[in-house]
Image (tube, rainbow, N blue to C red):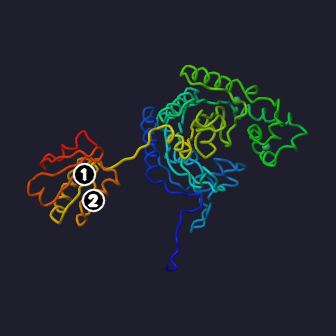
């Protein structure tokens, strides 16, 4: 072997190949069809943005920004980052194109790769995929309820069941500081016993202490005051109406006082959806309201609500719930000789333009070897074309599933495939 290197996909990155890609396409197809019926349009933003957008939008002090960003300098000396999540980019786009001047709410969805420099482990990738939605311009809990309902329908269509929405309110700029003050004084002297992560988070986002999974932190927060009991009147009213609307939409939900979500930008509603297929610990989707993010990223004061779903996790579940898809050719043309090749390519061309998946055999190979190939690609029908068939104006056919066969005139070839395969 020469000195040429053997290239492999980068650590934590991978190819999505058939048959998995059919599952991905199915999920994306269900998403775009369903989301459209709720008035969501697709938006495609670049995978790279100015680093400042993420440090500002997601927030310094979060694990994502502090530890996991794919950041580099471009040749012009600018700091660029691959997007670690979708919301900040969609917000940037919303502001840049002044979409707040259009009728509200403006509703978008996206599907694409995100990048985080994590230690790769089972089920986690450095390039991973998300489907997410962002809706701008309504502060009404009706938007929260509609989007949560849409997400639930999406997951149901994917065959996931026992879906439970866990919901919480983490307050707003008016009431959250008061609550975090109460939480900190509740912890009092015991603050020093929190895990190192919580100690660090503590100054920037004390709410994170509530969802820390470290046993000593769980013990320390026993009996801690609940954010729900410290909401201002507006936040309380928002939460009450949301629960009322979720009940009306027949969406099972539970209040989870300890769920705060990891990102700084959420206000009021935060939620996660868990599926019985995964066990209660694992959320399949999560999101919430972010009423201050647009203005914090330099735009007007526009409230918003969104969620994201991890494709890797969803595809693993969907593979268990939906029947496997194995697309196969409808027709395999076994071509015997040079004249058969000439006519065969013309016939294949006609079938393909009629939407019939057609493969052609090697005209120099034996019929037996071409039949074997047709079998390997699981073609529905083999069409045999040789000098004899051309002279007679009739092709021979064989249905591989049951071995039946016969012959028919070439003029009937297109209609032959109608309603079969
Ligand atoms: Zn409030
Ligand atoms: Zn902790």
Image location (x, y in percent) of residue 361: 26, 60
Q: Nearer the viewer, residue 40 or 275?
A: 275
Q: Nearer the viewer, residue 267 or 124?
A: 124
Q: Is residue 330 visible?
A: yes
356 horizontally vs 91: left or right: left
Q: Which mark is residue 382?
A: 1
Q: Are the residues at dot 1 and dot 2 in contact (C-beta closer than 8 Å)?
A: yes
Query: Which residue bears the numbered disc 2?
Result: 370
Image location (x, y in percent) of residue 247: 58, 20
Q: Residue furthest right?
A: 189
| Image quadrant in which the C terminus is located | top left
In the displayed structure, would residue 411 be above or below residue 40? below
Mark before the other along the chain sequence, 1 or 2: 2
Image location (x, y in percent) of residue 391: 8, 57
Q: Nearer the viewer, residue 324 or 307?
A: 324
- Element under disc 1: strand
């Amino acid at each position: 072997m020469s000195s040429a290197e053997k290239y492999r996909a980068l650590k934590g990155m991978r190819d999505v190949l058939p048959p998995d890609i059919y599952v991905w396409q199915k999920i994306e197809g269900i998403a775009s069809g369903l989301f459209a019926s709720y008035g969501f349009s697709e938006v495609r933003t670049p995978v790279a943005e100015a680093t400042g957008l993420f440090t500002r939008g997601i927030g310094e002090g979060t694990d994502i920004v502090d530890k996991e960003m794919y950041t580099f300098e471009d040749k012009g000396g600018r700091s660029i980052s691959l997007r670690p999540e979708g919301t900040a980019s969609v917000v940037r786009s919303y502001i840049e194109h002044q979409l707040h001047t259009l009728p509200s709410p403006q509703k978008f969805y996206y599907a694409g790769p995100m990048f985080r420099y994590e230690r790769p482990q089972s089920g986690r990738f450095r390039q991973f995929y998300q489907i997410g939605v962002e809706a701008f311009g309504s502060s009404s809990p009706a938007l929260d309820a509609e989007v949560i309902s849409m997400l639930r329908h999406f997951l149901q269509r994917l065959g996931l069941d026992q879906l439970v929405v866990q919901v919480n309110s983490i307050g707003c700029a008016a009431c959250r500081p008061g609550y975090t003050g109460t939480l900190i004084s509740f912890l009092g002297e015991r603050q020093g016993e929190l895990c190192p992560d919580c100690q660090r988070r503590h100054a920037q986002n004390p709410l994170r202490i509530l969802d820390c999974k470290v046993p000593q932190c769980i013990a320390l927060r026993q009996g801690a005051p609940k954010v729900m009991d410290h909401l201002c009147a507006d936040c309380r009213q928002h939460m009450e109406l949301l629960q009322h609307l979720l009940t009306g939409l027949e969406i099972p939900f539970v209040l989870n006082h300890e769920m705060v979500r990891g990102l700084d930008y959420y206000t009021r509603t935060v939620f996660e959806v868990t599926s019985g297929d995964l066990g209660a610990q694992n959320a399949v989707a999560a999101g919430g309201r972010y009423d201050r993010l647009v203005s914090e990223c330099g735009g007007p004061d526009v409230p918003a609500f969104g969620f994201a779903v991890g494709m890797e996790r969803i595809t693993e579940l969907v593979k268990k719930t939906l029947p496997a898809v194995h697309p196969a050719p409808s027709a395999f043309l076994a071509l015997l000789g040079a004249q058969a090749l000439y006519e065969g390519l013309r016939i294949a061309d006609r079938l393909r333009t009629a939407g019939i998946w057609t493969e052609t055999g090697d005209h120099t190979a034996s019929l037996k070897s071409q039949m074997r190939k047709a079998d390997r690609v699981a073609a529905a029908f083999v069409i045999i074309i040789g000098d004899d068939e051309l002279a007679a104006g009739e092709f021979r056919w064989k249905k591989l599933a049951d071995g039946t066969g016969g012959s028919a005139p070439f003029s009937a070839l297109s209609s032959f495939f109608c309603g079969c395969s």
